[in-house]
């Protein structure tokens, strides 16, 4: 009973973190890309304040998701077999074969984790007196472009998660 | 080549050199060197010998004759001993006409006489960035108003206050280098109150800047201006002569033949003259700082400020504020027209040039700033001076006195810190580029007529005459600061002005950022008006060292919830007793929403947490990545191990 409850709690917590992360992602995307795409202006004012408010929450969610979901997203033999089939056009029965979308989801997950580091550190480090003007510009560009890739990976990942969930329910 | 031929060539060269030197000496009174002669031959005919750059950095020694206004040599043995004219004396070797259009002389320069047509041709001088105005003040009428011949927004032309060019020279000539408006316009109608006929013109006093003599006395120059001895001022200041007498005591239609004990009298000091009626004038091409600072000093009341860091490093004002023959001095602000980019601003020396084919930064040893930890958005929104110049901002603004506004350096000046005009510093306001920078401000205070939305000042003399005994008499005023003006007094004066001349518009009084006028029932009302806003001009100096720049202690220097940069109190100066002690917060001047600024500053309370959380989170993510990367590596090693076993 205790075991069941703890699993349920963990599942609920995971869902909560997922939802919070998605919410933060949406807000950060709007506040981050919005001013430039809509007004052709740099992030400033209340947009910046909202961005900075949601950013640490998102960072926490990212850390929590990395810890909670990393093991589920590790690559295994089925993924290897799937790749072998594609690249070697093998039809031999080499054991279980992964679903293509699952593989993409896993790749996206690890991309998200990998990109989260420059994404977060580029801003966190710029707040310390370590980098001069050239360094600040580099960090800002790093934040920009890692955000872009991160957003692409996150969109694909969330889409695949949603599709998987819908399929599961059907 | 044999010995005879060599001797002949040497002889020819020596003869040519002697001939050239003789030509050079005959062409002007300056002693010049061989390089000047060579260049003179190559240069256009109209270029005067003193205006040719010889390339010799040693400078020229000026042992010259002094010429009076009628082009006669004047010296201790001459009779009469007239004051010398620098227009004539310096004009022998230098192009006075070109120089007279330089920045220090061209305010009010509106037209030139076309020699061919005899007509005046309008000339447009770029007023450039707003700067310190001339401030006309009068305690009795509680007036302080910024004046300028340059069309800077917020300033008024002196004529609007009944101040003619002669009177302008009389009032402000103490800190004017002469020329421009201080010289009678022969083609204009003369105001009978002007006394050009007796005072003479205040020609450009080249010595104001170029004298290197320790005996040159600018204070004496100011003294002569106060005596209305315009023509004699430069001579008296030069230290070459003593001038007694005062034009002020002479009637306006006085003629030399009338005689008077008050006629200015020049006595040249014999010891300062050499044979051949010449004298040594210690002239410097590179102006010393004290010459500039006589007119451009600031006293920050209650704040200790060191000398500008550039001066402390051994630079001089003219290292940055350069000019050519035209004397159009580089003012040094960003976007200054007609200035080469690599010299024109702080960036010019301190940052690498973006488009220059050769490196031009680091001039004069300027260090390139690292600005560690400062987000680049600051450089888009702030001027360099915002963090580096002026007094360190405090909880409230401080008062400042400047040479030009407070006649600093002149004799018998009121040195009280309370004396008008009241200047406040530093106030952070966006400049013409939209970047926020430190400014000095004054709150205009004057009587005016309101025509539609336009405000036309009333001359203080007219107000005094109209007000009679309502306003304080000069003798009733204890000091040269604001009188205790009551609402009732303003109401009464406005009532009288309204009854005297209603056709000129509705009489109003502007002070403390508000416009006061009488409503239909005769009650005093206040309203906002652009003309009532403060007049602000940027602070460029004194530049503080990097270790004393804003932000050196961290973001909280500006982004704390009580940081003076955003939340400092700016005194709203008003002579109205009911309005004294009012303040506004700095954010109101910066054009930033005060609520947002407060919220943004409050966010900085959590900034350390933000840093901690984000770094900790990225560490966790990195640890997970590393863990699974190692696991992947372990798998790989296993795979390779299995393959090895297969081969075995």
Image (cartoon, coloured by chain):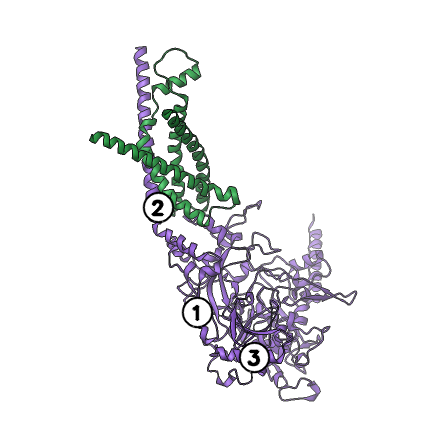
Chain colours: A green, B purple
Task: Name the foreground residue: B542 vs B266.
Answer: B542
Q: Secondary structure at mark 3?
A: helix
Label 1 marks which chain's residue? B
Graded by Cα atoms within 10 Å as few (under 14), some (14 to 19) or many (20 or more), the crowding at tag 2 reads many
Q: Which residue is mark 3?
A: B495
Q: Which residue is mark 2?
A: B610
B343, above or below A38, in the image: below
Label 3 marks which chain's residue? B
Q: Is residue B215 visible?
A: no
B482, above or below B454, in the image: below
Label 2 marks which chain's residue? B
Q: Which residue is mark 1?
A: B582
B144, above or below B555, in the image: below
A65, above or below B86, in the image: above
Where, by quadrant of the figure, is residue B585 drawn?
bottom left
Front of the two marks 3 and 2: 3
Q: Earlier in the sequence, mark 1 or mark 3?
A: 3
Most distant residue in the left direction = A2
Image marks 1 and 3: residues in contact by CB distance under 8 Å: no
Whole-angstrom CA distance, mark 2 to mark 1, is 38 Å
Task: Name the foreground residue: A145 vs B149.
Answer: A145
Q: Earlier in the sequence, mark 2 or mark 1?
A: 1
Does residue A37 appear to the left or right of B339 in the view shown? left
> Which residue corresponds to the image point at 59% horizontal and 53% vertical from the top-left?
B340
């Amino acid at each position: 009973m205790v075991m069941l409850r703890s699993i349920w709690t963990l599942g609920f917590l995971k869902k909560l973190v997922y939802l919070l992360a998605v919410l933060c992602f949406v807000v950060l995307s709007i506040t981050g890309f919005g001013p430039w795409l809509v007004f052709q202006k740099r992030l400033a004012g209340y947009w910046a304040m909202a961005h900075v408010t949601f950013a640490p929450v998102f960072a926490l969610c990212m850390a929590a998701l990395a810890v909670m979901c990393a093991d589920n997203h590790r690559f295994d033999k089925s993924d290897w077999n799937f790749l072998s089939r594609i690249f070697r056009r093998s039809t031999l029965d080499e054991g279980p074969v992964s679903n293509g979308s699952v593989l993409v989801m896993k790749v996206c997950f690890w991309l998200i984790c990998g990109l989260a580091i420059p994404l977060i550190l580029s801003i966190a480090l710029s707040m310390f007196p370590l980098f001069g003007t050239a360094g600040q510009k580099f960090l800002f560009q790093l934040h920009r472009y890692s955000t872009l890739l991160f957003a692409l990976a996150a969109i694909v990942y969330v889409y695949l998660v949603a599709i998987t969930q819908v399929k599961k329910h059907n | 080549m044999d010995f005879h031929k060599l001797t002949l060539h040497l002889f020819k060269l020596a003869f040519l050199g002697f001939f050239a030197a003789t030509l050079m000496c005959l062409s002007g009174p300056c002693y010049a060197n061989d390089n000047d002669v060579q260049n003179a031959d190559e240069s256009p005919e109209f270029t005067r010998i003193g205006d040719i750059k010889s390339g010799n950095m040693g400078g020229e020694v000026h042992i010259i004759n002094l010429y009076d206004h009628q082009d006669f040599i004047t010296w201790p043995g001459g009779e009469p001993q007239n004051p010398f004219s620098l227009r004539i004396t310096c004009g022998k070797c230098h192009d006075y006409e070109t120089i007279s259009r330089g920045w220090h002389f061209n305010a009010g320069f509106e037209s030139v006489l076309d020699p061919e047509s005899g007509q005046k041709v309008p000339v447009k001088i770029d007023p450039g960035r707003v700067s310190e105005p001339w401030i006309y003040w009068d305690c009795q009428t509680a007036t302080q108003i910024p004046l300028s011949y340059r069309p800077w927004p917020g300033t008024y032309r002196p004529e609007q206050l009944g101040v003619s060019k002669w009177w302008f020279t009389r009032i402000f000539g103490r800190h004017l280098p002469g020329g421009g408006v201080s010289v009678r316009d022969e083609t204009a109608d003369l105001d009978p109150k002007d006394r050009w006929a007796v005072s003479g013109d205040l020609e450009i006093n080249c010595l104001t800047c170029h004298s290197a003599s320790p005996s040159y006395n600018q204070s004496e120059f100011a003294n002569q201006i106060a005596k209305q001895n315009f023509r004699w001022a430069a001579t008296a200041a030069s230290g070459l002569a003593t001038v007694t007498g005062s034009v002020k005591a002479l009637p306006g239609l006085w003629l030399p033949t009338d005689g008077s004990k008050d006629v200015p009298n020049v006595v040249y000091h014999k010891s300062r003259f050499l044979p051949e009626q010449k004298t040594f004038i210690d002239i410097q091409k590179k102006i010393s700082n004290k010459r500039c600072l006589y007119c451009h000093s600031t006293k920050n009341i209650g704040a200790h400020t060191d000398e500008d860091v550039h001066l402390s490093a051994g630079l001089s004002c003219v290292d940055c504020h350069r000019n050519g023959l035209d004397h159009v001095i580089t003012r040094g602000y960003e976007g200054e027209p007609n200035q080469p980019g690599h010299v024109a601003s702080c960036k010019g020396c301190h940052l690498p040039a973006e488009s220059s084919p050769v490196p031009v930064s680091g001039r004069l040893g300027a260090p390139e700033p690292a600005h560690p930890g400062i987000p680049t958005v600051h450089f888009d929104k702030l001027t360099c001076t915002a963090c580096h110049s002026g007094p360190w901002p405090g909880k409230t603004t401080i008062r400042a006195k400047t040479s030009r506004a407070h006649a600093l350096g002149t004799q018998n000046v009121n040195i009280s810190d309370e004396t008008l005009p009241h200047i406040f510093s530093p106030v952070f306001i966006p400049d013409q580029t939209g970047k926020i920078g430190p400014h000095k401000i004054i709150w205009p205070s004057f009587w005016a007529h309101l025509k539609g939305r336009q405000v036309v000042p009333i001359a203080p003399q007219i107000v005094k005459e109209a007000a009679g005994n309502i306003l304080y008499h000069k003798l009733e005023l204890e000091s040269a600061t604001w009188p205790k003006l009551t609402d009732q007094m303003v109401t009464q004066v406005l009532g009288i002005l309204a009854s005297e001349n209603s056709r000129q518009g509705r009489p109003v009084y502007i002070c403390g950022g508000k416009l006061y006028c009488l409503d239909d029932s005769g009650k005093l009302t206040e309203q906002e008006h652009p003309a009532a806003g403060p007049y602000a001009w940027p602070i460029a100096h004194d530049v503080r060292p990097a270790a004393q720049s804003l932000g050196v202690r961290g973001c909280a220097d500006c982004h704390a919830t009580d940081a003076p940069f955003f939340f400092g109190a700016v005194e709203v100066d008003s002579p109205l007793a009911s309005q004294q002690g009012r303040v506004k917060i700095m954010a109101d001047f910066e054009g930033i929403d005060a609520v947002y600024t407060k919220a943004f500053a409050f966010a900085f309370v959590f900034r350390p947490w933000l840093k901690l959380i984000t770094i900790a989170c990225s560490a966790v993510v990195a640890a997970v990545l590393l863990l699974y990367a190692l696991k992947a590596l372990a798998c790989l090693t296993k795979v390779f191990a299995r393959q090895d076993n297969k081969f075995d």
